[in-house]
Image: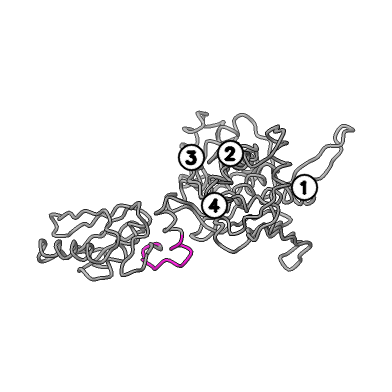
Amino acid sequence: MIRENQSLELKETVSNSFLKTVSAFANYHDGEIIFGVNDEGDIVGIEDIQKTCLSIENQINDSIKPKPDYSLKTNLDRTITLSVKKGQNTPYRYHGKAYKRNDTATIEVDEIEENRLVLQGMNLSFEELPSKEQELFFDYLSRKIKEALDLESFNLDTLKSLTLFHVKTGYNNAAALFSDTNSFPGLDIVVFGSSINVMKRRVTLAGQSILKQYYDALDIFRQEYVYEVIEDGVRKKKECVPIDAFREAVANALIHRAWDIKANTKIEMHPDRIITSSPGGLMPEMTEEDYRKGNFSYLRNPIIANIFRRMNIIEAFATGIKRINELYRNSSSKPLFDVTQGSISVTLPLLNNIEFTANEEKIFYGMKSNISYTRTEVETISSLNKDTVIRTLNSLIEKGVIMKKGSGKATVYRKR
């Protein structure tokens, strides 16, 4: 039985509605439409294959502008597969409207999405567009970037080298975002008490340089999550949440968010966690799995990202998620990454560092999250003998990082 997904649509017969999905695939990602399969995924076939193929071809050529890249294939089970490639000349419109896939449904894009498709077709991003405001000042950027790059002066040539100014078009939106004052949204930071009904503090950092927003957010973090202890007669600073993880979360929110959405990035500071939520979701080319693994990144705002990298705020592109996970390596509490179509949220819990023995490390870090293991499987991944595995598993259970389910031969172990 065949099932629909974001890249596959099933059609029992040919009707005009398939043209919306052709528009969606051409605008965002490769996809297929199989004709001759009903909604339940059962193959019913097409009566006149050749006539139907000609009809599909004519409808696409007559109704989708510009013409998308597609191909038709007839199958032995009397179905027809229409393959559509993602195009470069977006937006691809059906009767003047552009469409996208929303899970297994095809919906019309909104005005913001339409504008993005237009820019994409012109090989432009929102940050590259000329700023509406051309009288911009960069006192804060100048001071910070001279410190970071050891520059003697900051002038128009500096702005050109940072891709913030072009001789023909002037300042772009990226420049406006780094300027001392602007009309863009920013960071909305709320410090909660014992519950969400108790709001201890609220600060909105908007209409100012995104660089200042970043550093001001770090100052608020230090006030709430960094404390001092005395160890061996020496006063030391401790972090409830890794400051470098918070740096990455805030920097990523500013770099990857959609700046054409008039909404603030939200930072919720709770007693037991910090949640950073930025508008815009993932780039169309990127999957949730790509994001979580952090292997590579499609940059929505490459100019902003490059400036943050040159200032050593971020180490390199696409390493943020990996760095955050690594900072929680020895903690039983782990960061959470929630991806929706319209936003990305990163939750950083309080650190709960645990001392592991060498054998405990072999087992704990050998086990993947959300996967259950039998004792024999634990022996395999750790290369430890049966008795050692049993003792070590019991120790990890006592430390609260491993849980045991079932009994007898049905016993399994998994990370909490």
Considering only order in the chain, which callout, 2 or 4, is on the residue closer to the N terminus? 4
Considering only order in the chain, which callout, 3 or 1, is on the residue closer to the N terminus? 1
Going by the numbered disc 3, the residue's amino acid type is: Asn
Q: Residue at x 18, y 64 (%)?
A: 58
Please tell me whether residue 304 belongs to the stretch shown in magenta: no
**Highlighted magenta segment, given as a residue range:** 103-115
Residue at label 4?
127
Element under disc 4:
helix
Residue at label 1?
222
Indicate which label's residue lies in the foreground, 2 or 1. Answer: 2
User: Is 53 placed left or right of 29 in the picture?
Assistant: left
Considering only order in the chain, which callout, 1 or 4, is on the residue closer to the N terminus? 4
Q: How dense is the environment of label 4, judged by Cα within 10 Å: few (below 14), some, or many (20 and up)?
A: many
Indicate which label's residue lies in the foreground, 4 or 1. Answer: 4
Element under disc 2:
helix
Say which of 375 and 381 sits in front.
381
Considering only order in the chain, which callout, 3 or 4, is on the residue closer to the N terminus? 4
Q: How dense is the environment of label 2, judged by Cα within 10 Å: few (below 14), some, or many (20 and up)?
A: few
Distance from Cα at disc 4 to Cα at disc 2: 15 Å
Q: Are marks 1 and 3 in contact (CB under 8 Å)?
A: no
Residue at label 3?
295
Query: Compared to 40, does 267 lie above or below?
Result: above
User: Is 220 placed left or right of 23 in the picture?
Assistant: right
Residue at label 2?
161
* Quadrant of the image containing the N terminus: bottom left
Say which of 376 and 164 sits in front.
164
Distance from Cα at disc 1 to Cα at disc 3: 30 Å
Say which of 250 and 141 sits in front.
141
Q: Residue at x 69, y 45 (%)?
A: 141
